[in-house]
Amino acid sequence: MAATPDVDDLVAQAREGRPRAVARLISLVEDASPLLRSVAAALAPHTGRAWVVGITGPPGAGKSTTTSALVGEFRRRGLRVGVLAIDPSSPFSGGALLGDRIRMQEHATDPGVFIRSMATRGHLGGLAWATPQALRVLDAAGCEVVLVETVGVGQSEVDVVSLADTTVVLLAPGMGDGIQAAKAGILEIADVFAVNKADRDGADATVRDLKHMISLGRREIAGRHWRQPVLRTVASSGDGIADLAAELDAHRAWLAEHGELDGRRARRARGEIEAIAVAELRSRLTGPSAREAVLAELTKRVVAGELDPYAAADELVDGLR
Amino acid sequence: MAATPDVDDLVAQAREGRPRAVARLISLVEDASPLLRSVAAALAPHTGRAWVVGITGPPGAGKSTTTSALVGEFRRRGLRVGVLAIDPSSPFSGGALLGDRIRMQEHATDPGVFIRSMATRGHLGGLAWATPQALRVLDAAGCEVVLVETVGVGQSEVDVVSLADTTVVLLAPGMGDGIQAAKAGILEIADVFAVNKADRDGADATVRDLKHMISLGRREIAGRHWRQPVLRTVASSGDGIADLAAELDAHRAWLAEHGELDGRRARRARGEIEAIAVAELRSRLTGPSAREAVLAELTKRVVAGELDPYAAADELVDGLR
């Protein structure tokens, strides 16, 4: 057992960029440790500076390779960089293959880069609150940019995307044909599109389809129009990565110019407060053993058809008072 | 505007197998209509009979074709069959392609089959409560078996899988290689594996990998062992579908023999009650406009770094009293 850490000391060390302190703080928030609240309180005054870039797309699009290449690009500018790699523990996500982590290893010894894989197997809604807290740790640790890499499948990931100031959607040739992508709403979440593996057959068609979709579905943010660019990248060789970073910069500048950076941060904070409050209420519903007996009895009556689940939920909630 | 329907009358019609009444009831529960609670109450006494079979797997494995073939198989036995096709509205789910719905059309005019696509774009947790309610409608409508087809990606789908009495995981040759599948935990959710498109190259290897994984990770349910079979199917031609249905039957018989059918139903009811109670509490947090002003103020303080999100959530929850 590790000794109980001094939270203020850990936060001070994290602000100096000490990787072990950063890792320890993320573990404390991720595991919902008893110190979670004091960690959150100690971090609060030092947050609000990081630029959060979401990188998402279907399995096989090259998210980890692209993330790694972008880390290199931002490091060349001397920025401190954080990476949160989200593994939603999906049965089929394909998001946590061994190779992905290996690709990221070139940055593992760089003291200006903090990389963290977040996994939440079995913890419903876990990502929804643990990820923003990990983000706060990296923000307080002085990361000027935090890359949040998520496998873009399932509802939970869309929530993670909502954390980002700027979201890149990656596609690869031959996947995500135009109709499917349009239907599925990636237009709504993408600030920048990159067709990765652009040296492969079919890249032209994928770029063309995307551009066509964009021309159909113009996207307004509060009445102001951001034109989603479509780039070609070959992340494994670095081709196109500087251009991609430049487009991300352009989007950030556009957000700042239109007051949208503040808007997105407020939305993020609001989402965090709500998620934590709901988790707290949920634990009050089922936590104490007396409540547990009530829930077991209600379950029995619903199974027997004596009660419907709404009436049962009402009884459960009313019992909270 | 449609006139307000008579709920008891609708339920009576649904029990007679009238498709319009079934569709109307599902719409009422899916849209969280004001009648939702009276619908739930009217359904309750007539539920608890349906056998729920989950069909899941990665995009491209042939879920819709397999579902359709199983519908045909159960219809040949004279059973009334319900189908819930879940589209988690993922940006990349691939779960709602035009072709899928067309494949199901052969059953569209069969009065013994009720097919419903559920979509929940944008509604966080929407599937979690709407799907079980739709299931209750089909159950009350006398469906002896309900097939729940979900694209198996993301956390939300794992929740849907937890609805099922019996879960089939579909794979196709060349996807889901052994290591990835094992890592991702499909072993835990599958009662029966089917390697679909088994006439393609690589089917033998996929079957072999699965069998190897199963031999490594034996699965115990309450100390009793169910051996997960691995079948080969070509759903498009119907090959292997009768065998698949027979294995589903065998699993159901095994569940019944070990008291697990009741156990799974209780778990399902419990999950429903919890999900509804949490949704109710969530709406109390943010619903009324006075609360909205409180949340806006708390958000502002969190963005300014004056307050951490946990302290803000505490204030929000305390204000509920």
Image (cartoon, coloured by chain):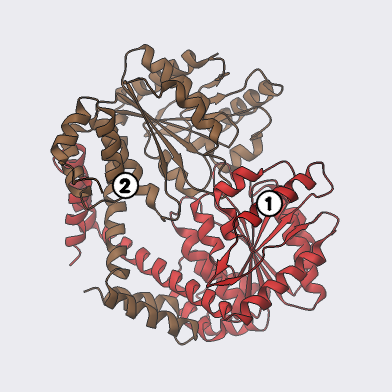
Chain colours: A red, B brown
Tell me which residue sits at (27%, 71%) in the image: B288
Amino acid carrying mark 1 in the image: His
Q: Chain of mark 2?
A: B
Residue extending furthest toward the front: B1
| Disc 1 from disc 2: Cα separation | 43 Å
User: What amino acid is at disc 2?
Assistant: Gly
- Residue under numbered circle 2: B271
Viewer-proximal residue, A3 or A248? A248
Q: Position of residue B84 (x, y in %)?
A: 39, 34
Which dot marks residue B232? none
Task: Examine the rendering and report whether any part of residue B209 can be seen.
Answer: yes
Disc 2 on helix, strand or loop? helix
Tell me if mark 2 has few (under 14), some (14-19) or many (20+) residues whose alpha carbon lies within 10 angstroms of its own.
many
Q: Residue at x 82, y 41 (%)?
A: A201
Q: Looking at the picture, tell me which residue is in the foreground, B259 or B27.
A: B27
Residue B267 can be seen, yes or no: no
The residue wearing badge 1 is A212
Is residue A219 found left or right of A238 in the rendered image? left
